[in-house]
Image: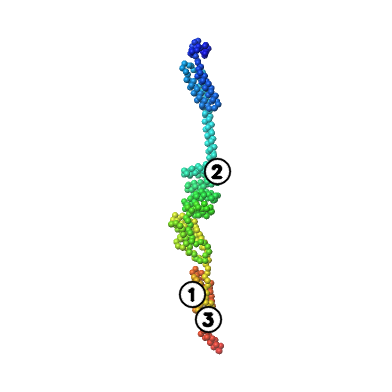
Amino acid sequence: MKCAKCGAEIRPGCVYCSNCGQEAQIVTEINILEDDLLRSMLEEEEKSGSQTETLVSIEKAAEKTDQKPHGTKTASDSSKKKKKRMLEKKRKKARKTLVILVVLLIAALAVAFGVMQYNHSNSVSYQLKKATEALDQKNYTSALQYAEYVLQLDSENEDALVLEGQIYVLMKQDAKAETVLLWVIDQNPSCKKAYEQLLSLYDSNNSYDQILALKSKVTDSKILSLFDQYLLAAPEIDKEGGNYNEFLEVTLSVDGKGIDIYYTLDGSVPTDADKKYEDPIQIEEQGKTTLTAIAMDKNGKYSEPVSAEYNIELDAPDMPSVYPDGGTYYEQKSVHVTVPSGTTVYYTWDGSTPTSNSSVYRDALDIPEGNNILSLVAIDDNGLSSEVLKCNYIYYPTSTTDSDTQDGASSDAE
């Protein structure tokens, strides 16, 4: 081994140059292993691209280099400085790479967040979800803003419109709520949610006229069932509408306690200002009569009106019959009258039409003397009159006839 300073040969075992006194720089197996390890780690770092792991490995190798065996010398200061500069350079490069990666990651996250926000802002389902969440938290203003934004994306979105109507109800903006919900129902008569919201609104305001008006337009049985909880059961009428030939007595009834029935006979929908049902209704007029009834409780809640139309055309009673039915008589004769069932017979002898103020037939009538016109009419319990029967009866007693004959003969003699 030669001296690194003067080049003189150093004898084995000597640690100083015998020529110049310079300390011998011995390269041991450890130094060789260190160089191999460092080179291997640098190559591995280039293959994998992992800057951080390489730096750690290099630092560990440097630490191993510091573990020198007793009695040996380290490599030159320049070599150590070179290694340090290399390590520092690697560290700086690793830091720079790390910073770039972090910046790229942040940029990627920002882009992803922006894309997500854009998608959310243009997503009907997301905006509806946010509106519902705000509504659950009773943040009605925010809920309304979300719902309105959905309608900007889809102006006819049914869920958003129903939700908007619900929000208006909760915000006590009834007119707006009604307008929105009626529009939804007009577009989709089977929208159950819209009916539920609107019925709840009408019920809270005791607007039963609106409930009835709304129900009158519904044909869907599933939708009709929604009205049951908002209206009382309608009264029952014991006689069906139709044609009758007699006056009627109609009975009304309703289930439940504390419920009154009001009715009209002119077809109009009754209110609590109309007649209150207490006793059976007497319909005693000919022609058409329309009975309409509703049930109402003490809270002002009432039923759908129920109606029945009656057309009453009474049959006139038969004419009375008589025996004998007229003729000339010289002896006293009585007239017997057959009175139709359920009637009273009235009569006159002067040919005038009898009325209920005329004489009542009760027993056989004696024919008055002279030339007489017997007029008879039968009037029933309903005030209906039969046709008038008229019969001519001439009665001249025999004594009167003889006297008239003698008077005539005397006149001829003169």
Where is 357 relative to 162, above or below? below
Q: Earlier in the sequence, mark 2 or mark 1?
A: 2
Element type at marker 1? loop
Picture quarter with the C terminus: bottom right
Secondary structure under the numbered disc 2 in the rendered image: helix
Q: How many marks?
A: 3
The residue at 51%/66% (across/down) is 246
- Upstream in sequence: badge 3 or badge 1: 3
Q: Which mark is residue 329?
A: 3
Residue at 54% over, 39% down:
119
Name the one closer to the observer, 239 or 283. Answer: 239
Q: How far across and how far down the image is residue 350, in percent?
A: 52, 77
Report the Cα–Cα distance between label 2 and label 3. Answer: 108 Å
Tag 2: residue type?
Leu
Q: On the image, numbered disc 2 is attached to which residue?
A: 153
Kind of residue indicated by mark 3: Tyr
Observer-side mark, 2 or 3, equals 3
Distance in Å between CA atoms under marks 3 and 1: 22 Å
- Disc 1 marks which residue? 361
